[in-house]
Amino acid sequence: QVQLVQSGAEVKKPGASVKVSCKASGYTFTSYYMHWVRQAPGQGLEWMGIINPSGGSTSYAQKFQGRVTMTRDTSTSTVYMELSSLRSEDTAVYYCARGDYMDVWGKGTTVTVSS
Amino acid sequence: SYELTQPPSVSVSPGQTARITCSGDALPKKYAYWYQQKSGQAPVLVIYEDSKRPSGIPERFSGSSSGTMATLTISGAQVEDEADYYCYSTDSSGNLSGVFGGGTKLTVL
C-alpha cells in the first residue's frame, strides 16, 4: 500500500539545521509531487513548499525562502527537507504529503528547537 | 501574501448539517481541497478539486465552490466528525505556491 515513512524526532539548538526525510513506497515515486507542511503546537497547518521528484524542481513558501531546501533521491524514493538557522518558532511537527491532492500523509516528524 | 479565511469554530448537534466556509480571492480560478485532522493525527483528505470525494470518505461529506468561497458540507454530522478542518488552495501566480486556511474546529454535541 502507499506509504510515507518519515524520520524520527529531532532536538536542535537555535541556529542549527535539521534534515527530515520521507521515504515513499507503494507507488511510482517520480509520478507525484511531494509537499512539506508543518504544524506548530496548538496551531494550524502551514505549507512550506513542494518538490517534483522527477526533475527535482522546487517551489518554496516566501516565508521560508533562503532557509529551506528540498531535495530527493530517486534511488531510494526519498525526499528530504532541510531547514537552517533554526529558532524556537520552528518547533513543530513536520509532515510530507503526496501529490497535487496531498492524498497520503506521513505520520509527522517532531522537531524541537531549544537551548 | 495570499490568504484563505475560515471561521474559527462551527458547532452542530448530531444529525444536523455542518457547513464550513473558506474564502479566497483566487478561488474562482483555483481548486479548493479540504482536510480533516483529529487530535494527535495526521490530516486526511476529505474533498479534492472543490467537490470530489476520495474513496473511503463517507457520502455525508461534500464540497462546493462559488466565486471566492468554497464550502465543506457535512450532512448529518456524526460525533466522530468532530475535528479540525482545513481548506487548501494555491495562489494565482502559477508557481505552485500553496496556502492553508487557518482551520475550523467542528464540535458535534
Image (spheres, coloured by chain):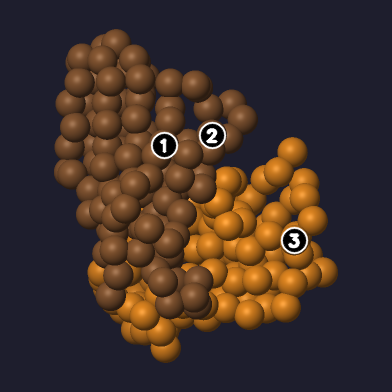
Question: In the depicted view, which residue is nearer to us: B74 or B28?
Answer: B28
Q: CA distance from mark 1 to mark 3?
A: 27 Å
> Which residue is rendered at x = 26% and y = 42% of the image?
B21
In the image, which is nearer the foreground, mark 2 or mark 3?
2
**Could you say where residue A97 lies in the image, as x and y percent from the top left?**
55, 54
Mark 2 falls on what kind of element? loop
Which chain does brown denote in the image? B
Relative placement, left or right, of A14 versus B43 is left
Height in image: A7 above or below A17?
Answer: above
**Quadrant location of the N terminus of chain B in the rendered image:** bottom left
Q: CA distance from mark 2 to mark 3?
A: 21 Å
The label on residue B53 is 2
> Which residue is rendered at x = 54% and y = 51% of the image?
A102
Q: Give the crowd class for mark 2: few <14, some 14-19, many >=20 residues within 10 Å.
A: some
Question: In the depicted view, which residue is nearer to us: A96 or A93?
Answer: A96
The label on residue B63 is 1
**Could you say where residue A43 lies in the image, as x and y percent from the top left?**
25, 53
Q: Is residue A21 visible?
A: yes
Relative placement, left or right, of A65 versus B15 is right
Mark 1 falls on what kind of element? strand
Which residue does the numbered mark 3 point to in the structure image?
A: A31
> Which residue is rendered at x = 35% and y = 20% of the image?
B75
In the image, which is nearer the foreground, mark 1 or mark 3?
1
